[in-house]
Every structure is written in C-alpha cells, then in structure tokens.
Image: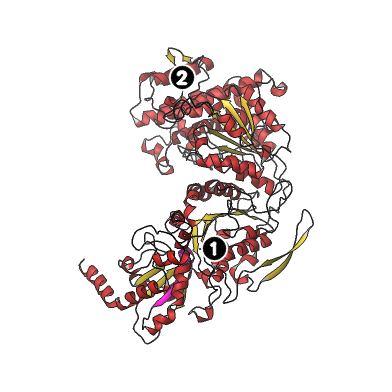
Amino acid sequence: MSQVSPVSVSDLKLPTEREQLEDIGYVTCMTLVLLGNYSQTGHFGGPLAYTPFNVVTHLAGPERGGLRFDYRRPKHPYSDKFMLAAGHCAPTCYALWMIMGEAMYRKYQATGDSRYYVPPDLAMLSVDGLGFRRGAGALKTLLSDQSLADHRLFAQAKGRGIRALSGHIESTDVTNDVNGGPSGIGIATAAGKAAFWDIIGAPVGSPKVIAFEGEFAMCAGHAQELKTQAIALQVGKRLRIFFSDNNAGIDDALIGGVVNRKFEGYRLIDQWTSYGWNVFSIPDGHDYEQVLGVLKTMEAWDPSDRRPMIVFGKTIKGYWPGAVNGKLPGTDQIVGYPSHPYAFKMNSDYFVTLAQTFEERYGVKFAGIRDGAVTDPRERLIQFKTNIDIAMSALDRNGLGDWLADRLADIGDSLKDNFKVRIDVKRDPFLDDRLRVANLPEEPQSLTVKNPLSGAEKQIKVSLFRKYGEVAGARRAVSEIVKWLNYVTENRVLTLAADLSESVNLEHGSIWGHYDPETNPLGTRLKAAIQEAGNASTAIGLVSQNASVDPEKFAGVWAFSGTYGAFTPLMYLPARVWSQQNQDSKFRTGVLHILAGHSGPETAADARTHFGIFSPQVWKLFPRGQVINLSFWDYNDVAPGYFAAAEIAAREKKVGIIVIEVARPDFKVADRTKFADPDLRAAAKGLYVIRDFAPGQPKHGYVVAQGSSATFNLVTILPRLEQAGINVKVISAISEELFDRQPEAYRNSVLPAEAKQDLMFVSSGTRRMWPLRNVGSLTDAYSMTSDWNNQWLTGGLEADVIAEAHLDTESIFAGVVRFGKDRSRRLDQQRALLKALE
C-alpha cells in the first residue's frame, strides 16, 4: 500500500489559494444545507463529508490531478469523467455547480466577456435550488402558481425555467457522468469507462476517471466486482477512486455495527490491496491540502503502473467546516449515520446553529430563519431564494467570485477539440452498408485482415448462413455475427462473458484475440471473471462513451456481455439504469448487448438451477422501444434477425439494448424451401410464416412458435399434422419489436389482429409472459410451455428435460391436435364471454 501523508505543495500559492478553496467549500456546505432545509427532504451528512473532495477535484486544475472539464461545455467528450457514484450525495454537487454557475454568470454580467458565458440551459444557477427533488412537470408552474413569475428574486428563471434536481445524481447533471443511486451500481461502470480510452488509443491517463463512493456501497456486489474488473483491464492511473471512509451508512455503522469489531481482519484498505490495487490514504479527507497532495501524487504517478488507484480519506459524515472537535456553538455536532437523512424541521435549532457559523465567518445574516418554519408556500419560496442568494454573496468577498470564474475559464480553456485517438472520430462504422440485412453475404467469406498496429496479416472465415442439413444450432452463429461486426467496424465490438466465452459462442468473434492495453490493444475479447453484474457494468461503461465532439455522431464501441439465460437477471439492474442514461443523453452512445446463451428449458440438463425460461423474461421489463429482444431457433435466423436490430439501434438513439436469446442444442439447419416464407432473411421481419393454412379447408387456428426445441420439434411434426387434417398456420416468432416495425400489410398477412383470439404458443419461454402482447383469453389454456404445471423441472439429460417440459414431438403433436379440434368450442366460449358483457 502506498501511503500519502499531508504534504506541502509549493505551487498551491499558500495561504491565499487554500483559503479560496476552503471558502468555496464553506459556501457549498451552506448551500446544500439550505436545499435540505427548505425542501424538507434529501440527505445531509454524506454530501457534507464529500465536499472538500468535491471542491478540490473540480478546482485544483488538471496539472495538479484535478478534473479537466469545461463548465461552459460540461459534456465535452474529452473532459475527464467525474462520477459521483454515491448518488444520494448529490447536494454537494448541486451546490458547487450552482456556485460555479453564479460566479460565471456574475462575471459575464459585469464584463460582457464571452469567456465567462455559459448557455442558460447548461448552467446551474441559484434559482435552481428551488428545483431540488422536484420534477420538471411541477417546476413549470411552481412560480406562477404562487404569483412569483415576475418577482425580481426569480429573474434567472425567465425563459430557461428551473432545473429539476433529482434526489440522486444523474448523468445529465453538469460534469457528472453516471446515474448514482442504487448501491454499487454507480461505480461499477468505472472500469469500462476507463478502458474505453485505452481501447481507442487516447494518451495514458487522459481523459481520466475520478469516482467518489463510500464504504457501504463498496460492499455491494457490483462494486465488489469492480475490484476484479478494473485490475483485469489494467486501467492503471486512468481510474482514480475517492473512498469516503467514515464508517457510517443509512441506519448503522459498518464496523462495529454490521460487522462486529471483534473481527479485526475486516479491514477495508486490506480488501483493496489484496486485489492488487494501488491504494493511498490520507488521515483527514476534509483537509484541502491533503486532498490536493494525493491528487498531485496520482497525477505524477508512473504511467507504466497498470494498477487502478483508490484513495482512502478519513471523513466525518455530518462534517461541518465551522465545527471544532465535534462541537458547535451551544450543541454537539450531529455525525455518523444519524446525519444521513435531512430529518430536521425547517429552520430548526440545529440548522440555525450551522447557519450562524456561516453568518459569523462571512458577515451576513440569513432572513427569517430564527422565526420558525415557514408554512405559507409563497413565503417559503421567497425565503428559500433570499437565503440562497445570501449564501452566494460570499462570492463578492475578497474577489472570491472573480477567482472562481477565472479558474473555471482557465480549466475550460485547457480542453481542446483536437484530441488524438486511434479511431476515426468523424465516421460511424456501425452505419456501414455492409451491416445492412440486404447486403449480408450468404456464402462463407474468406477474408484477409491486417493489424494496423503490428502490420500482421491473417485469414479469417465468416459464415453468416449455413446450408440446409448442416448441424449447427443458433448459438453457433453468435460468434459469426460478432466477427462480421468486427471486420466491418475495424474491431469496435467488445465481448465480456465471464469464464464461458467459448460456451456462449462469443470467443471467436474477436479477430485479434484477447485485449491487453500494452501488448494487444486491438483485441476485442476482454478477459473477465464469473461476475455477471460486473461484466455487464463494464460493458455499459464502454458503450456509454463517445469520442465525437458532434453529439449527433457516434465514435465509440458496442459491447456484448453474455452468460447462461438463467443468470442474466444479475445484469438487469445495471442495464436498467443504463437504459435511463441512454434515454437522457444528449450524445449518441453505443449499444449494450445481452447474450442469454444456453437459454430455455434445455439448460436444465446442467442442473435445475440453470433452468432458463423465467429469468430471461426480465429483458422485457423496459419501456417499449428501448430494447429489442431476439429469440432464435435456427442458425439462419441469427444474422438477418440480429442485423435488422442493429440497423435500427445504429440509427435510433432510443434503442440502447439488444437482447439475444439462444439455446444449447445443435439441430440441423432448417430447409426453408419448404416454408411458406422461404426468404433466407425472413427473421429480419420479426415474425414469419413457416406453414400457411391449406386453401379450401376449414381453418383450425394460429400456432406461434418461439425458441429452439419448441420450434424445431413443431416443424418436425408438420407432416403428421397435415395427415391428421389439422389445418393450422404456423408462425415463427423471432422478435415482436422487429415485427412491430413492419408495414401494416405484412403484419396483417402474417398475423391479423383477430388472429390473437385464435392462437396458441409453443414456446421455450413461460406462460407468465407471452412472446406477443394482447393475446386472447384462452391462449393460456392451449399453449405449450415448460411451466405447463407451474413447477420447476427436475433436470436430467436434455431429451428428458424436453419431455418433462412437454415440448417433445409427441407432446406438441397432441397439444396442437387438441387446439385444432377444439376450435369451434374455443370460439364459442369467447363469444359467450363477450355476450355476457351486453
């Protein structure tokens, strides 16, 4: 472990500059407490603990290890990435960003110099304090409802409105680059964010990623998995984490609370050194000089040291800059987990005590705080904004505001648009016409590729389609689509699949093998441990970056993270948060791919724990249109179905996730000449017809198949159904999302609206969530799924599992015959239900 003691930094210009940093910190503390006081919600102690870290990190300057960013262009792609992973500590950032915005606003108003101009929609100003923990909808009328729209106090809201400030920080917030909140989720993407810049050839350590988190969230699984992720990716000094070490959570202490103090071996620092990280510590995380010292030390660190960095700073939850030895005038300081929520009544005695220390230091007097809680909504808003402005008036003291504006402008000016990376930032390779479904090569391709770094050449083969009769299950095509992607995009598709990359068929999608930042930077197979949540989080970190200065263009990577279908829910939480970030981002971002390899009932052949029919259903739990789900049964469905989804995702920013579900069995490639729709690329349409109704005969209903064994076995018995006189239309369901995008005429020709009342499913999925929405009331009574008896399968050999699931040929034949013969009774029953409503 590397220890960093308090150091004297010669270029800090002591004592003046230290005093200015501390003043900004004090104003930040006072402002964030005002937010809680008047909103009567939010968190108190944690944001205060982070404030010195926060202030120094933003204002030290990049040459001293602070952030390189431009407040005037806060989402510039080449800025350093700041991650307040401790999302509930958002008030420290909201407060600091308001203070920064005020300094720039006032300087611009005073000078007219465009160097200090910040677009109103990007700035965070004092009026935005009223938006703390309020939704954008409510804020539209907040002032007009109280006849305050024209009040001079709220002039900043004219035209631009009031910004909504969420209770937990989001990636849209000024310099912040993560949705903080769910414990461990925020920080888990940090390794991917850091690795992205190595992968595209950015200079070592620039941009850097600086993340803040505390001890409780660092216990969460996602954060624990980050330990291995970051060291495996060898991100080095590009990743720097500040660990706020105050042993205080929401309702308890960690050591001495959750973990009994008798377990002396539970040492937080040791947990990180044992993972190989470069670990630093400072005894006082509230000492501005110590924080600056450790920032400078990390900045000057040997770039060849590929260990990620973490700093343990001892902090106090509930820190207050005016407290002395845990005492405030007339009372004890509230610290530890009791300081977590803002549980004090408006203008309470403790709040007044805190405010009093600020008043005495800066010679100001807050309005009305000693008169008790404000009950009138209009007067509360007036007092709130009045006192925010009084806190901000400290910027007028000793030129503090001018210093801050100049510092922000200087840091911003250091950020340039011409940044050298290995990739072409003006071309999006995912828009290449070779990736369009219509242009996919049907014959196997023998291709010569050249490594632009080493000059080495090699031959690769890509088989997006296979001949009828070849034995190759759908999963075998996964590596081929990834390989074709990498060939066309020049190695911009990365894969992370735990210790089973070969098993889920991602392994051979990499043209140049395993990634190593030093010896093989063009490798796209990222080595990863069995950490599904961490792998998905790393993939999210990778795809969330964009190296294009044009927000409408994408210059980044796509990523696949895969595992058995049964275990993909471990990936859902980070993916859900990612979907929200993608929706809100002003920049184009990459696409996260979740590969549910070995899905369906077949995987119960491994063990009952691997039973993969319920788990993959979580991938439908997103707003419609933000994810495309693909369920493949035949090898020749994979390329057209996938690249149809990829065409959409590359052009529609809303689609941030593609989910691919394949099963284990290797079946013979289907003979499509016998299908009603013989198109080799039929899967691109989402649903396609395998067998149409026989003309001139009574119709017995629609059978929709989805999944590997289910569809293969259904296709096998089609001749028997014909011999038995069962006239059903059989449809393959690859993707409802793709089907929804087809022309109305096609949709009606395949599955007209009325067909959903005359339909059964044969599915490798579950009756709890059908492959198509809005199906008829008797669908469940006739459909065939593995959970037919609402029990877990017992496992066994694959054939045994399929038989137990009632998806073997005999069971499917019997089920479809029953469905066909019952048609008249089935329709009569539904008519009776409708008639009963009259």
Look at 36% across and 19% down and name the residue there.
Answer: 371
Residue 458 in view: yes
Q: Is residue 745 visible?
A: no
> Residue 579 placed where, x, y %?
50, 50
Vertical side of 316 occupied by 305: above or below = below
Badge 1 local density, few (<14 within 10 Å), some, or many (20+)? many
In this view, the residue in front, 453 or 545, is 453
Q: Verify CB contact (< 8 Å) between mark 1 and mark 2.
A: no
- Could you say which disc has been placed on residue 645 in the image? 1
Instruction: Tell me the quarter of the picture where residue 434 sits.
Output: bottom right
Closer to the chain start, of discs 1 and 2, is 2
Amino acid type of the residue tagged 1 in the rendering = Ala
In the picture provided, is 307 more to the left or to the right than 592? Answer: right
Give the color scheme: rainbow, by chain, secondary structure or one colour.
secondary structure
Picture quadrant of residue 650: bottom right
Q: Secondary structure at mark 2?
A: helix
> Would you say 221 lies left or right of 528 here?
left
| Front one among 51 and 770 | 770
Q: In the picture, which quadrant includes the C terminus?
A: bottom left
- Left-right relation of 418 to 249: right
Give the magenta part as a residue range.
725-745
Q: Is residue 716 magenta?
A: no
Q: Position of residue 234 (x, y in %)?
A: 67, 42
What's the amino acid at mark 2?
Leu
Q: Magenta segment: does it hold 736?
A: yes
Dot 2: within a 10 Å radius of its alpha carbon, few (fewer than 14), some, or many (20 or more) residues? many
Where does residue 782 sit, x and y in percent of width and height? 33, 69
Q: Nearer the viewer, residue 646 or 114?
A: 646
Mark number, residue 802 = none
What residue would you read off at disc 2?
Answer: 354
Cα gap from disc 1 to disc 2, whole angstroms: 56 Å
